[in-house]
Amino acid sequence: MCPVCKHLLRQEEGVLRCVTCSQAYPITEGIPDFIREELSRSADPVLRRMRFIDRMARIYETRLWYPIVLNLYGGFHSPSLAQLISTVSQHVQSTKGRVLDIACGPGTYGRRIASPTKEVFGIDVSMGMLRQGATYAAKEGIRNVHFARARVEALPFEDGLFDAALCCGSLHLFADTVIALREMARVMKPAAILSVFTFTAGRGGILKFRRVRECSRRDHGLHVFDLPEVEQYLTASGFKDFQPEVSGSILTFSARRQAA
Ligand SMILES: [Zn+2]
């Protein structure tokens, strides 16, 4: 669907075109691009760093990124990437159908969750990450994972399309958490499960220091949540059954989309 006017898209030569507002969304190397604004001029400090994020795509799944970030922010007893993938897989274990992977990066979680019964649709703001994801998926022979460039605040999908959603390593980066969660809820079916990995002001890593959290928020747009705050945001966005797990300063949780 058109992320602007929420009407249907028609596929033409190399573009998806909205049948109502005529906006055209180019498809590059099989990846539709639903972001028409220049993010380097964004007011959002996270989006302004897009060139850096694009370049980081190659190292994102290597030892040079995930273990360092987890230990630095979450503490030395943080779960590993493999453990996080396992937790998220358990949350969506009984799901059959379509899974939305929000801010999917190179499909770090989505590629590992895709199966004959789970078709994964990954969206991210970084074309570098999405290209890397498509390259990995092709090499690994994973066919039921698809990538598109889109913002969490304007998802290119109709209401109630997804049977589950993942949001791993990015909830803390969205400019407005409730706006992001509401848009996720819009495209999910009633009772569909949401699985999240984010950070909290816990006992491990540099995030246990209040001044680090304040500085991260002010200079880098990183929100470090406490648990009542997360639950409040979820309730305000149409989710229930908040099931948190905290390890160091790492928070994983599941929640369910409320019936409309
Ligand atoms: Zn439109």
Image (cartoon, rainbow, N blue to C red):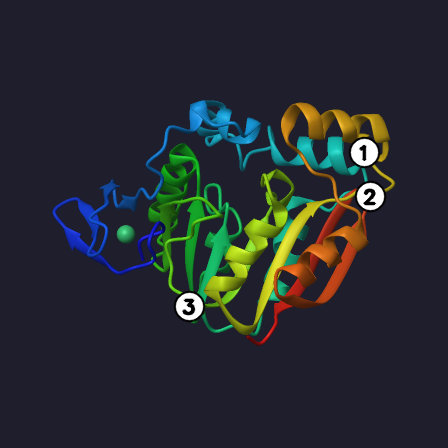
The type of residue carrying mark 3 is Leu
Between 245 and 234, the residue placed more toward the observer is: 234
Residue under label 1, please give it. Answer: 205
Q: Give the SS element for disc 3.
A: loop
Q: Please tell me which residue is depicted at 49% across the width and 63% down the height of the picture.
A: 186
Disc 2 vs disc 1: Cβ atoms closer than 8 Å? Answer: yes
Position of 159 with respect to 233 (left or right) is left
Measure how far apart labels 3 and 1 are at the Cα level: 38 Å
**N-terminal-most mark, 3 or 2:** 3
In the image, residue 2 lies at what x, y percent?
A: 31, 53
| SS of the residue under disc 1 | loop
Placement of 38 over or under 227, stated as above or below:
above
Mark sitting earlier along the chain (3/1): 3
- Does mark 1 have its CB less than 8 Å from ligand 1? no
* Front position in the image: 227 or 74: 227
Image quarter where the N terminus lies is bottom left
Q: Which residue lies at the image location 30% right of the left edge and 44% below the top edge?
A: 31
Q: Residues within 10 Å of mark 2 (few under 14, many from 20)?
A: many
Give the labeled residue for mark 3.
161
Q: Residues within 10 Å of mark 3 (few under 14, many from 20)?
A: some
User: In the image, is the residue at mark 3 within 8 Å of ligand 1 by its beta carbon?
Assistant: no
**Which residue lies under the disc numbered 2?**
248
* Residue 119 in the figure: left or right of residue 218: left
Q: Say which amino acid is labelled 1.
A: Gly
Q: Number of callouts in the render? A: 3
Give the x, y percent position of residue 225. Answer: 75, 44
